[in-house]
């Protein structure tokens, strides 16, 4: 892996995207076959997370990929209020614990792993690899891949309209997370927000409510990203 990383960071990233998507998909399928959600997915995700964390530490790229202390003032980042609002969106319609105690624990661990893995891979590896050629292109691709990646939900039986809405607001959120990472040099806020937002306990909203939520998410995410990318001008006006 190190030789591939040194030769081409983008190819290295694509390999990790493939590993994550394939192993996670297979683990999800096996878990469902066994009758307990996330039973195999969680061990697989924990394993991938530990391998990634070990590799990052071993190669001394912790700061490069944002697994470090956040840089910047909380005022400059508007005290993370937009990020907090975004993180709680899935719970606006209420929540329900329609799972066994074991499944609840597995879902919580899964949410944490997904937040870590997807932010490190898509925001850390992919964004940093693309930044070498163009920061603007890196922003666009990082956001789009994060959003379009949710199309796989169709394979698990998700409705087309809800999936399209998810792709739309996930792209905006991906853009926002990238802005937070780019300006704050840390993925920690993104990982926490992503983990909380990936809630398996949210109540599925009606189409109209889902559409309104998607619009709100897009407006807040894009607006917050723009503010972060032009902090001096905005903060002075405040």
Image (tube, helix red, strand yellow):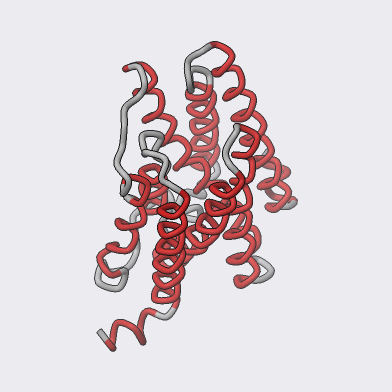
Residue 106, position as x, y percentages in the image: 40, 23
Q: Residue at x 59, y 59 (%)?
A: 142
Quadrant position of residue 74: bottom left
Image mark count: 0
Query: As rendered, which of 101 and 154 lies closer to the eye?
Result: 154
Please, is residue 125 above or below residue 53 in the view? below
Query: As rendered, which of 161 and 45 lies closer to the eye?
Result: 161
Residue 207, position as x, y percentages in the image: 47, 50
Side of 226 relative to 236 (left or right): right
Q: Residue at x 41, y 34 (%)?
A: 200
Please, is residue 238 above or below residue 122 in the view? below
Query: As rendered, which of 201 and 128 lies closer to the eye?
Result: 201
Residue 37, position as x, y percentages in the image: 48, 21
Q: Residue at x 58, y 66 (%)?
A: 139
If the image is split into quadrants, where does the N terminus sit?
A: top right
User: For the view shown, which residue lies furthest in the top direction?
Assistant: 34
Q: Residue at x 41, y 45 (%)?
A: 205
Please, is residue 85 above or below residue 96 in the view? below
Residue 36, position as x, y percentages in the image: 47, 15
If the image is split into quadrants, where does the C terminus sit?
A: bottom left
Side of 75 relative to 9 (left or right): left
Query: As rendered, which of 158 and 23 lies closer to the eye?
Result: 158
Please, is residue 229 above or below residue 40 in the view? below
């Amino acid at each position: 892996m190190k030789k591939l990383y040194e030769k081409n960071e983008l190819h290295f990233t694509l390999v990790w995207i493939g590993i994550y998507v394939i192993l996670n998909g297979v683990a999800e399928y096996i878990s469902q076959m066994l009758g307990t959600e996330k039973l195999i997915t969680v061990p697989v995700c924990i394993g991938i997370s530990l391998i990634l964390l070990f590799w990052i530490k071993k190669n001394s790229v912790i700061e490069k990929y944002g697994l470090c202390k956040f840089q910047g003032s909380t005022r400059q980042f508007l005290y993370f209020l937009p990020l907090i609002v975004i993180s709680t969106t899935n719970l606006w319609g209420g929540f329900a614990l329609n799972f066994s105690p074991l499944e609840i624990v597995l879902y919580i661990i899964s949410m944490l792993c997904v937040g870590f893995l997807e932010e490190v891979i898509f925001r850390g590896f992919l964004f940093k690899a693309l930044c070498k050629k163009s920061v603007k292109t890196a922003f666009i691709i990082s956001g789009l891949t994060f959003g379009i990646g949710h199309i796989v939900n169709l394979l698990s039986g998700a409705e087309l309209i809800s999936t399209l809405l998810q792709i739309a607001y996930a792209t905006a959120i991906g853009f926002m997370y990238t802005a937070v990472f780019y300006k704050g040099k840390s993925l920690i806020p993104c990982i926490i927000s992503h983990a909380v937002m990936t809630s398996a306990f949210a109540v599925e909203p009606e189409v109209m409510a889902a559409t309104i939520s998607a619009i709100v998410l897009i407006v807040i995410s894009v607006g917050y990203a723009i503010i972060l990318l032009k902090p001096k001008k905005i903060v002075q006006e405040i």
